[in-house]
Amino acid sequence: MKAPCGPGTLDIMRSEVATLPGSPERPNEDWAATALPASGGGGTLVVLDGVTPPAGDDGCVHTVPWFTTRLGGALTELSASRPDLTLSEILSRAIRRTAGLHADTCDLSHVRTPQATVALARWDAASVEHLVLSDAVLLLQAPDGAVRTVRDDRLDRVPREVLRSHEATDRLRNSEGGFFTAAADPSVAERAVTGTTPRAEVRALAGLTDGASRWVELFGAGDWAECAGVLAKEGAAGLLRRVRELETADAAAGGAHRWKLHDDATAVYVAFS
């Protein structure tokens, strides 16, 4: 994808989105997009990972993909069209807008109401802004190749044995001492990890759902800098192929590294010239 060239604009060398469902029997609950505003000079990256609820009532008549599609669309539109708003303000407005679409039909106070993790980035000629909520990952690669990882580690602090209980997880979901996701409460945007980096310090960006970040976080196939190298050489689809190969090999060996064979996996990669 090439951005318009001219004074004050950025020439995007490469912009890729790749996603794979965890199972052909279930819809993909991830959602991702990149956008280059018509005015030129920047762009935005959005990655959502829909939270799969346990079987049973979640108070909503809609599916998780219904939710992520609408939240993702709102985030993309607002981040591209409202440079006057911070990313936290954009997330808050997008959550409020999406909640308004089903407040009359669904119980949005239900702890398992449709929700998603969020990785969001926006750039212009001067800076790169970032926002992460829950276990999505953003990678910011510097011109010298060094990679900075932006993560929200609150879910990591919850013991794995606690997360095996749906009831215990519900008590920690969107509550103090637990972890936060984008659901129906706009105030959760204040909990996101945010920051700004000078544009000159960023050569490439990547957004990953936890199904894609397994390459580093679950299988230890490389570090984050090596992950960025795979994205640069093989693209977003190449990283996902590597993840699937590791998952398949792990399953053949008895499945020591994962609690389910495949997860929805999505990667977005943007490289600047």
Image (cartoon, rainbow, N blue to C red):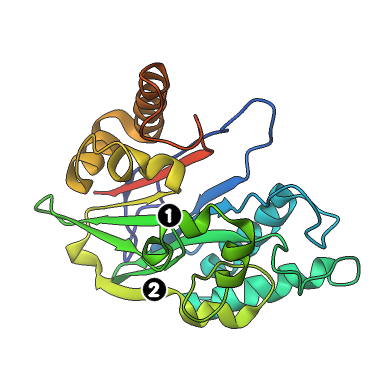
- Relative to 65, say whether 219 is above or below: above
In this rendering, position of residue 139 left or right of residue 236: left
Indicate the position of residue 244 as horizontal and vertical percent values.
Answer: 42, 26
Mark 1 residue element? helix
Q: Is residue 191 visible?
A: yes
Indicate the position of residue 134 as horizontal and vertical percent values.
Answer: 46, 63
Going from N to C along the chain, the mark reached first, 1 or 2, is 1
- Relative to 251, say whether 168 is above or below: below
What residue sits right under mark 1 in the picture? 160
* Residue type of the residue flagged with mark 1: Arg
Outermost residue on the top side: it is 252
- Relative to 183, say whether 160 is above or below: above
Mark 2 residue element? strand
Which residue is nearer to you in this view: 218 or 234?
218
Residue at screen point 37% across, 24% down: 250
Neighbours of disc 2 within 10 Å: few (<14), some (14-19), many (20+): some
Which residue is nearer to you in this view: 181 or 173?
173
Q: Quadrant of residue 89?
A: bottom right
Which residue is nearer to you in this view: 138 or 87?
138
Outermost residue on the right side: it is 105
Q: Nearer the viewer, mark 1 or mark 2?
A: 1
* Residue type of the residue flagged with mark 2: Val
Residue at screen point 63% across, 79% down: 186
What residue sits right under mark 2 in the picture? 193
Residue at screen point 39% across, 25% down: 241
